[in-house]
Image (cartoon, rainbow, N blue to C red):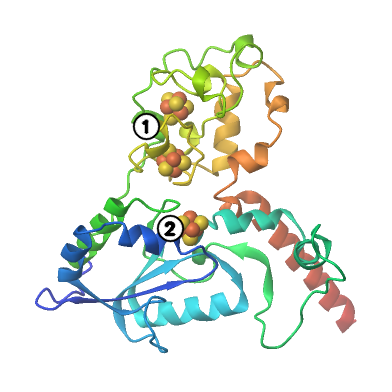
Amino acid sequence: MNCGVIDMGEKVQVATTWLQSCSGCHISLLDLHEELLDVLDLIEIVYSPLMDIKEIPRVTVGLVEGAVANDYNEEVLREMREQSDILVAFGTCACFGGIPGMRNLHLLQDVLARAYVETESTVDGIIPESPEIPALKQHVHAISDIVKVDYMIPGCPPPPQMIKNAIVALVNGEEIVLPTKNLCNDCKRKHDSMLIPKRAFLTEAVQSAPELDKIDRDKCFLEQGVMCMGPATRTGCGSRCLDANMPCRGCMGPTPDALEQGAKIVNALASILPAGGLMFNEDVVGTGYRYSLPVSIYPHRADDLEEEVNEEENEGDEQ
Ligand code: SF4
Ligand code: SF4
Ligand code: SF4
């Protein structure tokens, strides 16, 4: 697709914002270092959390970092959508809900109680309530749950070069094209016996990444008994963790053909582990859904149930 909206004679106007996030995706943009100057030759950032401008102006490209966790996030996101010709989900929190989305495993009141009342260092805690405090949503959402998203740049954070390539593509009126395969496709580690189930995976092999001295830098992590999300994760990060002799944690999110990232890794492990082996993974949810729970089946089902309950209650009130 040629976006066809960009006047090549002028710098492209860009707005950026962050919602429920850590600002890491913006930092990754700054991590382009000198190459940032090449990008700034092409675009003008006219609105950003890094600038003191109150209103979002009309722009060609809007980059949204972070998930939607409260009413104010949603308000800002809707305004960004309205003001942007092209809206880009910038980073894994925006694309898939990311780390903040892990709270979808819990009821909202339990999350608030844990944060404000139950922490070990809290004495006489109360849950703050004020019309000036944006209400937390029952669930954290990827931004595509709320508005139409034109493109995404995944990663936690997205690699600087991927951000640059995406911006240059948009400036040239081209699509942002992401890799579609999983990380194992690009992995240089030997992984020739991954599909042979073996008892050693659970017994004699090393079990955790901290046992770094025992990890063979040339061999597949899974084959050494160390959990690696490669089979369920989109490639494109440059294998950053693998090169540092750390297993993939899945931060690029699922491949486009995956139903969901968690199911994909469970499926992959089931083909490697001896029967029942999955029971030995103490944190299947934290492993498989760490970055993508809000776009997985579980929270949507929970939303449906919530809606059903509300509808039933409304019907009961009307009778
Ligand atoms: S994707 Fe990662 S780096 Fe970006 S805001 Fe979310 S947690 Fe931070
Ligand atoms: S599971 Fe991890 S280490 Fe093994 S081939 Fe895939 S990405 Fe590489
Ligand atoms: S190796 Fe995995 S966790 Fe590490 S940057 Fe790449 S996708 Fe993210």
- List x then y, in percent, for residue 3: 23, 67
Q: Secondary structure at mark 1?
A: helix
**Marker count (numbered):** 2
Disc 2, disc 1: CB below 8 Å? no
- List x then y, in percent, for residue 70: 62, 73
Depth check, mark 2 against mark 1: the one in front is: 1
Q: Is mark 2 within 8 Å of ligand 1?
A: yes
- How busy is the neighbourhood of tag 2: few (under 14 within 10 Å), some, or many (20 plus)? many
Relative height, residue 84 to residue 119 (above, below): below
Report if residue 24 is visible in the image: yes
User: Label 2 sits on what residue type?
Assistant: Gly
In three-dimensional space, the C-alpha distance between marks 2 and 1, rounded to whole angstroms, equals 21 Å
In which quarter of the view is residue 190 placed? top left
Report if residue 92 is visible in the image: no
In the displayed structure image, the side of residue 318 where residue 163 appears, left or right: left
Q: Is mark 1 within 8 Å of ligand 3?
A: no
The residue lying toward the viewer, choosing from 46 and 184, is: 46
Q: Which residue is mark 2?
A: 91
Relative height, residue 209 to residue 160 (above, below): above
Q: Which residue is mark 1?
A: 243
- List x then y, in percent, for residue 174: 21, 61
Relative height, residue 205 to residue 144 (above, below): above
